[in-house]
Amino acid sequence: MKAWVADCVENHPRCINESRSFVSTRLLDVAAFENSDDIRLVRLDLKLSPTRYVALSHCWGPSTQLPITTTTSTLEDRMKRIKFGHLSQTFQDAVRLVRQLGQNYLWIDSLCSIQDDKDDWAIKAAAMAAIYGNSIFTIFALSSQNSAGGCRVNAHGRSPMKSSRYCDINTGAGRIRLFDAHNPLRTRAWTLQERELSVRGIHFSANMVLWECRTTKASIGGPASLRDRWYELTEDFSSRSLSYESDKLPALSGLASTFAESFGPNPYLAGIWRSHMPSALLWKTTLKNEPSPLSTFQPRRPVSYRAPSWSWASIDSLISYESQRIPNFGDPRPEESIGSYDYGLLEIVDSELQLASSDQFGAISAASLLLRGCILPMQFRHEQCRNESMHGRGMRALIGEDGSIAGAFYPDIITEARDMKWVYCLSIKGESWFTGGQAPYELYQKSFSTDDEFSGENAMVMGLGLIKDTTRPNAYQRVGLTRWVKKTIFSSIVPSLFTFL
């Protein structure tokens, strides 16, 4: 492993740390005491040159098995000495590995951040991009469910294949395909950005040790653009769990800050980039009974406000941007030719955002959009649709004035839709019937010919299902996604100005 690190540092130009001016304010000194495995927490002078350190990515585990932490009451003791025997197995293994690889300092979130100091925690959360991006390498305890699992492999262990997700690692001579099989670290929301932001990583899976760096990461089959990459990371992030609901946006803050460098002066609004709108509003929740190994729970809303209804961060659910990965009759992808899509008369007039802290990519206290667009109230069917597979995917049929099917409605949360009879349909983006595979056929129970009025490009509409907000006049909230709505039903609707909460 020492050779891996040395070779990368010396021979990989792509793996040069870009923000060498960063200095972590606290680190664990693993060589603090001679003839002792004990360590201590040290505070670094920001005026000093950057110090080399290693970062650890791990699962904390349930509240009954939490690792050793630093709090306001234990900070002074931690800076004097931390007994090696008081460390969990994962922390002990990390300390030993750091020493073996010739490094002196280690970053562990539970010990380097003061856990009961909200200000200190917020500062460290906002600095995740710098913390992991500037570490010499990161140790990933992939197969450890809690801090007692260690950074090690089980030579005789077997990991059942439970997921179809994977990442490719290019070794030069070939490519290793790493599946997310029994990978507890993969389920934790915070660890997504820890992996993505790290320049180098040593991964301890159930039965092997893997090296990864920016140079060895595969480039084949990657996303077509940064926008597509953000959608991909958002989907991945949404499948992961959080110990605290309020951490949804802070746990993605580090990644967002790095993307901001590429996107330029582009407002970041509760997990969505303003320049990606309106397409970025067209996400969809995924139901538990849909064919995804990561759909472990039904969509639900957090207890306290976390994001506006138009943001995927407002819901705890595996979300999908599948509808935004559809080529436009062979034309360039929407990221490359945004003008090739018909957004009708929809206009994003303004946006407002109130932050909950100094982190511009972190938690918020309020957000809204001011839109001008065509809104049409429509009924939808609650009962079993004629095609069981259609209903099983959460699709509900929208009903036109003549009583015929006029489109599809996917409620964000099925239980909320049970008490609803009407939904306000907001037209956002033109689409064609062929973009949905079998879904439009199942919905309309017919095949469309080239002469059909709904067969042409942008002859149907994709949009959102809304309900009126009860606290503010002329305001709406999102309750679902609409697809394959007959565009003709909006022909007499005049665009109106409204607030989207």
Image (tube, rainbow, N blue to C red):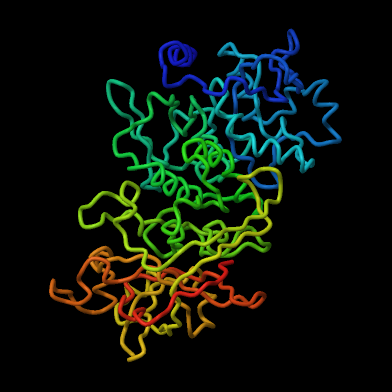
What percent of the width, then of the height, locates residue 230?
44, 45
User: Relative to residue 82, is residue 341 drawn left or right?
Assistant: left
Toward the top, the furthest residue is: 34
Q: Is residue 173 above or below residue 297?
A: above
The quadrant of the image that shows the C terminus is bottom right
Toward the bottom, the furthest residue is: 402
Task: Give the residue displayed 45% in from the left and 71% down from the top.
Answer: 373
What percent of the width, then of the height, locates residue 346?
43, 66
Residue 118 image-quadrant placement: top right
What percent of the width, then of the height, locates residue 305?
66, 61
Number of numbered discs visible in the structure rendering: 0
User: Relative to residue 175, is residue 380 drawn left or right?
Assistant: right
What percent of the width, then of the height, locates residue 262?
47, 37
Task: Give the residue displayed 47% in from the left and 41% down from the top.
Answer: 263
Q: Is residue 44 above or below residue 288?
A: above
Q: Nearer the viewer, residue 242 or 152?
A: 242
Task: Give the residue displayed 32% in from the left and 43% down from the top.
Answer: 224
Q: Nearer the viewer, residue 391 or 82?
A: 391
Q: Is residue 152 above or below residue 406?
A: above
User: Relative to residue 209, is residue 431 drawn left or right?
Assistant: left
Residue 409 image-quadrant placement: bottom left
Q: Nearer the viewer, residue 498 or 439?
A: 498
Task: Give the residue displayed 36% in from the left and 89% down from the top.
Answer: 401
Residue 339 image-quadrant placement: bottom left
